[in-house]
Amino acid sequence: MGIPKGGIIKGRGHHLETPTFDNLIKRLSRAGFKKDFVREALLPDWWDESGADDPSLLPELEIRVARFFGVPVASMRHPRLELSIPNYPGARLRKVANLDRNRVKAAVHTGLQIAAAVVRSLRDSARAVRLPPADPMDWYREVQCAASRFDLASIVNDLWERGIPVVHVDVLPAPKFQALACLVGGRPVIVLGHANDAPPRLAFHIAHEVGHVVHDDCGPDAPIIDEDESVVDSSTSEQLADEYAWNALAGGEPIGDVPTGDHRDWAKMADEVGRQHSIDAGVVVWSWANRTKDFKTGQMALKALYRSQRGQRMLRAAFDRNVDLENAAETDRALLRCLFLDPERDAPTHR
């Protein structure tokens, strides 16, 4: 007997629902995971649209979704059972305008699953974790000693060498988070979520999350989530993380007052401050942008200084050196496709 559209078999006053691909996709969508995300993160790389019409392939997707949600496969096969994202009661949301945790619940769960996939796929999984020093000036001096500079590339390389992965996720359920710091099997992982490509901007977000890590702000199943840098958060942990980041990025040197004028004035003055105190001019600009919350002028000044691009390429290069994608589990490779990892995709050259 054929199955009518919608997956319902009727007869003698009752009906029996049968699982279908469309039903599962709708349940995922109601849970916050739209079809485009599912295609990237959960379906096998050999999947095409014809697979939706082949009932024999449905168990493959059910298994993948069950692993992603951490639930028994049987719950995937019940068409009326709504999918529920696991709760992270210890999660702390920072810089969030609307404190409704459900807003970013799907993105946070995805970020944590991707972080776990990264850790499982490390080339050197036995590398011990060495946290950066609690004093930002000590971290600055250690990185400077090894790389003769303290910028995005040297920061990211240093963290990977310390056994702390740093990744940017391109594909996340909306709304996305700015950055996330978590522990996976005792290993800190920093996940960036917004589509930023300016190296000084990314360096600040990473150093800020390092501040959370060294201050023990995150724990198992208790990630720290920063959603939006434009939101003022006066909590002690955020202030300490900011102080840690700016002290490290500026090497303890004074950045100075925000100049008057437009982005060209910002760029000119930042270049002068940078030369005077041996600070990256882009760091100076982004400090002013954070201080004033004038991110538009800050971004334009970064462009004027030729410091607005190629940050994500640096993150990907470090990822490729440290993660064994070829030998990763197939379901992990699907999750890691969210990190600009398909050969036909690349980090953007323009923003």
Image (cartoon, rainbow, N blue to C red):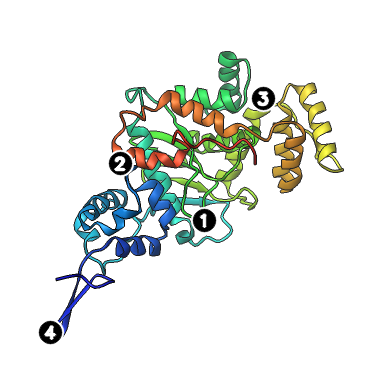
Identify which residue is drawn at 69% across, 43% down.
Answer: 290
Q: Nearer the viewer, residue 17 or 314?
A: 17
How far across and down, in percent of the image, does residue 248 sit? 62, 28
Q: Nearer the viewer, mark 2 or mark 1?
A: 2
Tag 4's secondary structure?
Answer: loop
* 2 or 1: tag closer to the N-terminus: 1
Separation of marks 4 and 1 at Cα, in angstroms: 46 Å
Residue that carries the numbered disc 3 in the rendered image: 251
How far across and down, in percent of the image, does residue 137 sit? 61, 24
Badge 3: residue crowd in 10 Å (few <14, some 14–19, many ≥20): many
Residue that carries the numbered disc 2 in the rendered image: 331
Residue that carries the numbered disc 4 in the rendered image: 12
Residue that carries the numbered disc 1 in the rendered image: 175
Q: Quadrant of the N terminus?
A: bottom left
Separation of marks 2 and 1 at Cα, in angstroms: 24 Å
Tag 1's secondary structure?
Answer: loop
Of the residues shown, which amino acid type is indicated by label 1? Answer: Pro
Of the residues shown, which amino acid type is indicated by label 4? Answer: Arg
